[in-house]
Amino acid sequence: MNKYVAVGAGVLGLLAFNALADDSDDVRPGTSTISIKWEHKLLEGRTDKPKVEFAHRMRNGFQFGFEQVWLYDRSESEVDAGFAPEQYEMNFKTDYKWTWGNKKHQAGPVLDYQLKEDAKNIRAGVYYGYRVSKNLSTKIRARYSTNLERIRIGEGDRDDTNKEMRYDFWLTYRWDAFTFVWDAIFLQKLSSNLNSSGVEQHIFDNNKQTAWEHEFSAEYRMPNSREHAFYGKFKFKQELNKPSHTSDRNGGYDWYGKRDNAIEVGYKYRF
């Protein structure tokens, strides 16, 4: 608990200093952003995820932050029980941005630490971005993730380690106060674990070791008050093709063969 209090006090102190310092002040530590988000999965009986994120980009290019995610289970049994939010995950994020060529090029490493109920994960990668024109830019990222610790709820530690790659390709177009982004995502399992029947267990929701997903977002930043922005995102997800997605395994909800699409809306405050 003390470490969370210390982190919270440090963040609050940074927020206060950043808010009071003038934009031209050389001692201003950088730019901070607070985001409040809500993700809603479209299939009946799935989940909602409220999220809060803080990120701070220092003037030297280093960025750090965290994201807290809760989860609401919208299945009928959970709703009848009180629809209470559960702690889902906490992510601690860092990266470094190096720019050159009049800021047309950017590149750097990323390193995240993720805490979930059933796992502790580390994620590391690199990215490169290129500004094609004033309005158009692209970015690619390759990120590797692996378990540091993994457990089965109620059963204890697991001896299999999940390893996977995620590749993102972003295409961004800016028009006046609007920003439109397409993110094409390729997921790939690098690890393997067969059960006693010889069936692969390290798979994605589509019952395969590879998957494609796409995300489309639109953001509006207020022209006369640019610290405020609102956005919406549509997540085109994988098909749910695991045996666990059939109705007899989910209290009557038949998700098998359907896409687990989601929408997300949010507000950002930059200062």
Image: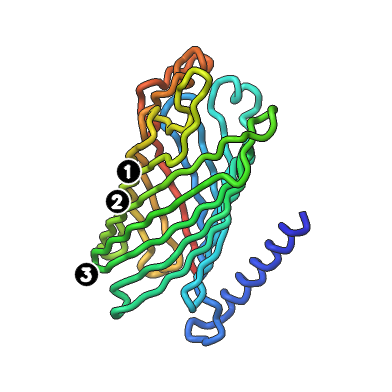
Give me the residue at 45% from left, 64% from top. 109
Give me the residue at 31% from left, 59% from top. 179
**Extreme left residue here?**
133
Question: For mark 2, does the 10 Å Cα neighbourhood hold few (<14), some (14 to 19), or many (20 or more) residues?
Answer: some
Q: Position of residue 161 (x, y in %)?
A: 55, 39
Q: Secondary structure at mark 1?
A: strand
Q: Position of residue 245 (x, y in %)?
A: 45, 21
Residue 46 visible in rendering: no
Q: Which residue is mark 2?
A: 182
Q: Which residue is mark 1?
A: 214
Label pair 1/2, CB-CB below 8 angstroms: yes
In the figure, is residue 91 to the left or right of 42?
right
Q: Which residue is mark 3?
A: 133
Give, as a three-letter code, the residue at label 3.
Ser
Q: Earlier in the sequence, mark 3 or mark 2?
A: 3
Give, as a three-letter code, the residue at label 2.
Trp
Label 3 – label 1 distance at C-alpha: 24 Å
Give, as a three-letter code, the residue at label 1.
His
